Image (cartoon, rainbow, N blue to C red):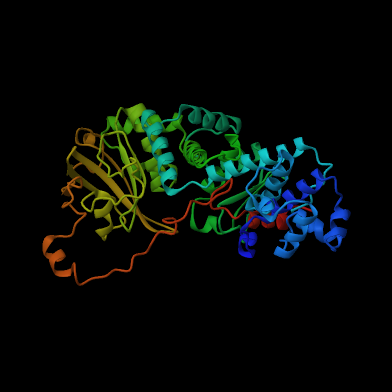
Amino acid sequence: MVTADTAEEVDALTIGRRIRQLRTAAGMTLEQLATAIDRAPSQVSMIETGKREPKLTQLQQIARVLDTTIDQILAEQSLDERAAMEIAVERAMKGQTFQALGIAPFRIPKTVPDEALRALLALHGEIDKLRDERAATPEEARRANVELRHLMRRQDNHFADLEKKAAEILAAVHHPGGPLTQRSASDIAAHLGFTLHYAPDLPQSTRSVADLAHGRLYLSSRVPGKGDARTAVLQALSSRILGHSEPRSYAEFLRQRVETNYLTGALLMPEEHLVPVLKDAKERRAISIEDLRDAYSVSYETAAHRFTNLATRHLDIPVHFLKVHESGTITKAYENDDVNFPTDRLGSIEGQMCCRKWTSRVVFEEEDRFNPYYQYTDTGNGTYWCTARVEPSSEGLHSVSVGVRFDDTKWFIGRDTPNRGVSKHSVEVCCRRAPADLEKRWREQSWPNVRTPRTLLATLPTGAFPGVDTTDVYEFLEAHAPA
């Protein structure tokens, strides 16, 4: 027996299409059905299009006029293909995809060809598929990061095509060699057809914004006062140099970010000039990340990154690199020297806790922030030597460290350090568990309030450029575009 509650639970669109299908099969017009049940044609039309749910008494009247039963109207019988497609399109128009695109729902008249409806549904399906691919879960992002790190390891973190691209750009602006000056950075922008503009209201979620229509590159007016203006400009231009298009997945977004940072470093510290410097330092047994930083006027992190790009390929020195937040969390990592970084079950290093005994954690305890900190650390994979520094960032303090196997320490300044540590982080009692006496005293007497990462329970930001508020960007460009 069909009740009023049952009728309310059935989809209004489906009920409406079944009524129209039965009416058409009976050879009855909309006006004739409306007259038969004493309703206006517009009211019956709203029922058939699913915009109004019919009451039980109306369903009884309609069933009687169409010589059928309410059960047949509500039965889960198949609709014809046309009706099924119309329902699917109307449901799509009410969904998030159409709303996000700003497409207002519209009536589907009989004059719309079936092929057009099929095309709309196919396009809707593909857009939903792309949205799902871009809404990467933290696990999917970690997988993408692991795959990218494996690629970097296979290439010794050296990308010959990016080195070549940097050399071509530097030659085009007649760079004389050596460290890149701020004037040369400006010349690169002009070579690519951009003028530089500093704005105090740059969108919070961006480092720079390029107006491709007018050849204008906007940067924050606060950058020159607190950081290297060259880096901000080159990072913005690198995507244009590399011809990056809108990323189709989170993996592609990560790859583009790595390429952008790599090319920026290759422009700031050109391979042709830097390799002889490194070889000379190796011959003198005086390799120093600090010396590279000072010689090229870059950050310690940029110098450390650039060293890892060239050390194995040109100096035959396997290396590892770590960037660790003051909380102990690893935020960036690279290795090709078999150091046993902590990983999760997917093989991801980023997001893991760095061992307390490693140089990257011990350096936070050092009061001397002027001089680099050096340390030998005995691990399950052998002894490693590291040089590290602590640098401030918008997210707090980070340590940046570069390390090598014991046998390669002889090439570096700082090899005579007396600092030593022993790490057994593969064994739980090393540092992942508190000392037994402390645990016994406080295990039942403490309750920390955990600062849960905001991405723990959510997917990563969606969109072509994850984390960027496109409305802010468009409003910014509209406000600053030349008349």
- The percent position of residue 332, horizontal first and vertical second, equals 38, 46
Closer to the camera in the image, 461 or 458: 458
- The percent position of residue 6, horizontal first and vertical second, equals 61, 60
Determine whether, in the image, residue 469 is placed left or right of residue 40.
left
Q: Is residue 12 above or below residue 296?
A: below
Residue at image coords 34%, 41%: 346
- The percent position of residue 203, horizontal first and vertical second, equals 60, 58
Determine whether, in the image, residue 154 is placed left or right of residue 242.
left
Is residue 435 visible in the rendered image? The answer is yes
Q: Residue furthest left?
A: 437
Closer to the camera in the image, 96 or 165: 96
Closer to the camera in the image, 306 or 443: 443
Residue at image coords 55%, 52%: 207
Is residue 101 visible in the rendered image? The answer is no
The quarter of the picture where the N terminus appears is bottom right
- The percent position of residue 116, horizontal first and vertical second, equals 76, 38
Closer to the camera in the image, 259 or 277: 259
Q: Residue furthest bottom?
A: 445
How many numbered discs? Answer: 0
Determine whether, in the image, residue 157 is placed left or right of residue 78.
left
